[in-house]
Image (spheres, grey):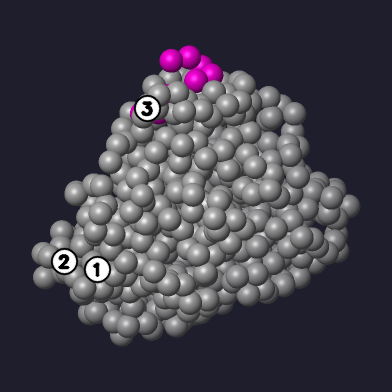
Amino acid sequence: MMRPRRALAAAGTAILLVAGLAGCGQSAVGADAGTFELEAHTPQPVGDIDSFTWALMTEPYSLDPAYAFDYADNTVLSNVCESLLRWNSDLSVSPGLATNFEHPDPLTWVYTIREGVKFHDGTEMTPNDVVVSLLRHLDPKVASFWYDTFKNVDTIEQTGDHEVTVRTVVPDSQFNQLMSAAPGVIQSAASTEAAGADYGNQSTGVNCTGPFSFGEWRSGESITLNRFDDYWDPELRAKAKQMTFVILNDPNARVNALQTGEIDGAWSLPSNAIDVLRASDTGSVHFGTNATVQSLVVSDMDGPLGDVRVRQALTMALDREALVRAAVQGYATPTDALTSESVWINGDPEATHEAFDDLPNHDYDLDAARALVKEAGAEGAKITYVTASIDSSFDVISQAVASAGNEIGLDIEIETRTPNAYTLLFSDPEALKGVDLFTTRWYLSSTDPLEMYAVLRTGEFSNYGKWSNPEFDDIVNRALQTDDAFDRSHLAAEAQRLTSEELPWIPLFDVPNSLWLGDRITGVDPSIYYMYYPWAATIGRAE
């Protein structure tokens, strides 16, 4: 949903300064600057290609699916490993390593396992591999980042020659949906056991079923994948013999490498370079469907931001229209919601209207924001905001938040960490100590807004600030046990309204997925599906 246009003249000093700098690049594409249309596909390739390169903004934490919880991990892993179901570019779900699933009662999911699928070491996938792969997420020794997906599971058993049955202790509407993402990845049970704690690291890689196999991981430099010629799906046979991910933490280095042709492709383009890349004659920029909202994560509810009035004040001190112009050169839409409309496609359209049209309004209002800070007794309160130079937008957002906080009487101090250290905020509780606020482009792995709101329940792993609201917990828990997608979406709308009122996270803007393709390659769809679909297999030689 589009927010009403608001005057940019009232924007904070930091925003205006950066917007002026960003504007210098916009002349490269003239009136098209800051405008975009979503595309479903890029041109089909004319043939195979020996190899191509792809930029990664950070190094993966691990290639073990149990820890594949961030962009870099899944961008690589999606081409090497596969899940029981597939998440397609239109965000629909289709058969993957399971040819079919049944839901005979609210507590049971039955998967028919595909026959004739080989792992990269040449051994054949069996239902036992499926059972072992799924059960790993419940093993306390593994400490899977995806444990919450399995927390309602009672048993996972082989129940036929080509059948695996999952039973839950309560109805769980989300379990099957996430079988098209990292939680549903199947790997060799034998290889996983043999590697132990080293599984998925630089020395061992992974043994899965995807169109590419693990080749080499040079720490801090690159990850190379090789075409797997025994891949089971002829329609997704890799068109490239080899692909190499090049790890480039510096966004300027990434842009230069794309412009010169040193790197052939990239996802999530640096925001301040989109206009420059659009004007380049060495490749093309594409925009596709996303399931992502840029938000501020409140990571300490025991600090000043634990008072909802302070969170509301900070939200009202941010002119999000101006922030979109400055941080992402206009390539986004300001939002009051923590989800994008793309993840509401399976519910009742009326629920979608409820979810987006009836939200509390936190429009830019410095006077009202100052009054809230004073009412809360938070004048002069120190807030630590952690950022990293992952993308120029992160720098702009941090400056804008600090400036906005200062305007209303808060003392916001910016702490900059390395990109790899920053990613630890999402997985290591120790990294969060002393941190009040940070930003994220939080993506969903399914087309159900409850995936977002489930993580904000009391005690959840990704509820970084430990926010707690019993009414919210009750709504979400009832929704999670509701099989009917229409009924569930109305409960999700209630959850969305509550988070907009209490702001455990502060939504900023809804961003499209961005893609760069150098002149040598084409064929990949520009959708967020790349996190879980073997997208690199579709890339071939351009005309």
175 displayed left or right of 245:
right
Q: Considering the numbered disc 3 on the image, is that residue within a helix, a strand or a loop?
A: loop
131 displayed left or right of 539:
right
At horizontal 61% and vertical 63% (from top left) the residue drawn is 423
Q: Identify which amino acid the numbered label 2 is placed on.
A: Asp
Which residue in the rendered view is the most extreme toward the top? 105
Q: Is residue 454 magenta?
A: no
Q: Identify which amino acid the numbered label 1 is placed on.
A: Lys
Q: Are marks 2 and 1 in contact (CB under 8 Å)?
A: yes
CA gap, disc 2 to disc 3? 37 Å
Q: Identify which amino acid the numbered label 3 is placed on.
A: Asp
Looking at the rendered image, the disc whose residue lies closer to the viewer, 2 or 3, is 3
At horizontal 84% and vertical 50% (from top left) the residue drawn is 302
Q: Which residue is mark 3?
A: 161
Q: Which residue is mark 1?
A: 241
Q: Which mark is residue 202?
A: none
Q: Which residue is mark 2?
A: 48
Q: Considering the numbered disc 1 on the image, is that residue within a helix, a strand or a loop?
A: strand
CA gap, disc 3 to disc 1? 34 Å
Q: Classify the position of the C terminus by image quarter.
A: bottom left
Q: How many numbered marks, from 0 up? A: 3
Q: Nearer the viewer, residue 234 or 282?
A: 234
The correct choice, above or below, for 412 with respect to 248 in the image is: above
> Mainly helix, strand or loop, the magenta region?
strand
> At which x and y percent is residue 82?
39, 48
Q: Earlier in the sequence, mark 3 or mark 1?
A: 3
From where the camera sits, is residue 238 visible? Answer: yes
At horizontal 54% and vertical 65% (from top left) the residue drawn is 201
Residue 77 placement: quadrant: bottom left
Bounds of the magenta span?
104-112
